[in-house]
Image: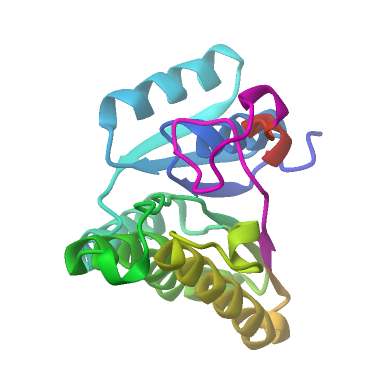
Amino acid sequence: MPPLDSQIALVTGAARGVGEAISFRLAALGAHVLLVARDTARLNQVRDQIQKSHGQATVFPCDLTDAAAIVRLSEQVARDFQRCDILVNNAAIGGTGQPLHEVRLDDWDQLMDTNLRAPYLMIRRFAPLMIAARSGHIVNISSLAGRNPLPNNAAYAASKWGLNGLTYSVAEELRQYDIRVSAVAPGSINTHFGDPSTGKDPAKKLQPDDIA
């Protein structure tokens, strides 16, 4: 049997890039992948590719900056699947490439809402399903920017430092329920994302499949 046979794995930011690669990998390992992002058309394409490879996937369009939308998402998953074995908080946006004192408040809020608040909202809604099952794995996709200074992208770095702190702390909270919480912190990745660590030859960057 595939190692993740019968498991339900939810991936945010699954429409492209790292999230797409993670979704393909989880499906290849036997999981039924719940594809979450705002771009319904792209999600449908990812689902179709997974199904052509004899995998299982379901599309769930969702704006992760909308707390009410995440509530509706979690209720639908609980109703349709009664469980969530793996949660991958991958969705993120990049920094503006500006000194912090030049970053607009709206840009700061959007970045924090996507990169840090959304993982909190997802864990808040999906951890109870894992607690009830007394098993599960939450994977937060962080960055080397969450460990090192990143001039001209302090807001992005702050979101990833925050995500690391959230990850390590929630890991201790959920350990008693046999739930693992992990952070994956890659460097520059060759995606559309526009990683703040610019200037590298794309061929020398990590590829989405490396993260998956």
Residue 82: percent from left, percent from top: 47, 58
Q: Give the residue at x 45% y 24%.
A: 46
Along the line of sight, which residue is nearer the eye, 154 or 50? 154
Look at the image and say whether residue 190 sits in the magenta stretch.
yes
The answer to whether residue 54 is visible is yes
Q: Nearer the viewer, residue 46 or 94?
A: 94
| Residue plotted at (51% across, 32% down) | 17
Q: How is the image coloured?
A: rainbow
* Membership of 56 in magenta stretch: no
Q: Is 13 positioned to the left or the right of 136 in the image?
A: left
Please report the bounds of the magenta region as a residue range: 182-204
Name the spot of residue 13 as percent of width and height, x first.
43, 43
Q: Is residue 71 visible?
A: no
Residue 83, percent from left and from top: 51, 59
Of 69 and 197, nearer the camera is 197
Tell me: residue 1, above or below residue 146.
above
In the image, taking residue 193 as reference, residue 201 lies left or right, namely right
In the rendered view, would you say 62 is above or below 190? below
In the rendered image, which quarter contains the C terminus? top right
Q: Quadrant of the N terminus?
A: top right
Q: Residue furthest top?
A: 52
Residue 21 appears in which quarter of the rendering?
Answer: top right
Q: Vertically, is 71 above or below 128?
A: above
How many labels were placed on the picture? 0
Query: Which residue is located at x 68 percent, y 22 percent?
Result: 203
Q: Quadrant of residue 141?
A: bottom right
Image spot of residue 148 (x, y percent): 65, 67
Q: Main secondary structure of the magenta part?
A: loop
Q: Residue at x 59, y 68 (%)?
A: 149
